[in-house]
Image (cartoon, helix red, strand yellow):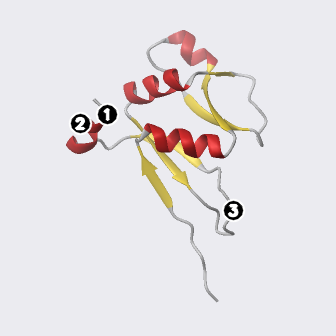
Amino acid sequence: MDIQISTDSITRDHDIIRRWIEDRNGQPVAVAKTLVKDPGVALLKIEFESTVKADDVVNISWDEFFRLFEKCRLSFLYQDETTQGRPSTFCKLVFAQVSSTSQAEHS
């Protein structure tokens, strides 16, 4: 029996991130109380049409999302397809392991 394992990818490329999220009917949000506490940082999330929106989140613009994404030095971990070959909505925002090359790309 063949076992198919899906693979995850990681990126800091804004175009790839936005396209991946929008292709899955997602949007960037932030936990409201983290925006109020310190406007320079926030707990960022991605919400999809298929999920129930949490009461404590607010929609944010792509510009605001990527401003905070860069300020917090995050990377986007994502899965393109499930093991069944369907588009996956699995993603996480993780702290970046920024190399000198990727730092130069986003400065």
Residue of label 2 = 104
Q: CA distance from mark 3 to mark 1?
A: 31 Å
Q: Is residue 96 left or right of residue 35?
A: left
Question: From what the image shows, is residue 48 above or below residue 36?
Answer: below
**Residue 100 left/right relative to 43:** left
What's under tag 2, amino acid-wise?
Ala
Q: Secondary structure at mark 1?
A: loop
Residue extending furthest left? 100
Residue 70 occupies which quadrant of the picture?
top left
The disc, 2 or 3, on the residue closer to the chain's N-terminal end is 3
What's the residue type where badge 1 is placed?
Answer: His
In the picture of the structure, the residue carrying the numbered disc 1 is 106
Q: Residues within 10 Å of mark 2 (few under 14, many from 20)?
A: few
Mark 1 in CB contact with mark 2 (< 8 angstroms):
yes
Q: Position of residue 49 (x, y in %)?
A: 76, 39
* Distance in Å between CA atoms under marks 1 and 2: 6 Å
Q: Label 3 belongs to which residue? A: 86
Image quadrant occupied by the C terminus: top left
Image quarter in which the N terminus is found: bottom right
Q: Nearer the viewer, residue 94 or 19?
A: 19
Q: Residue at x 60, y 42 (%)?
A: 21
Residue 14, position as x, y percentages in the image: 45, 37
**Left or right placement of residue 82 versus residue 92 in this view:** right
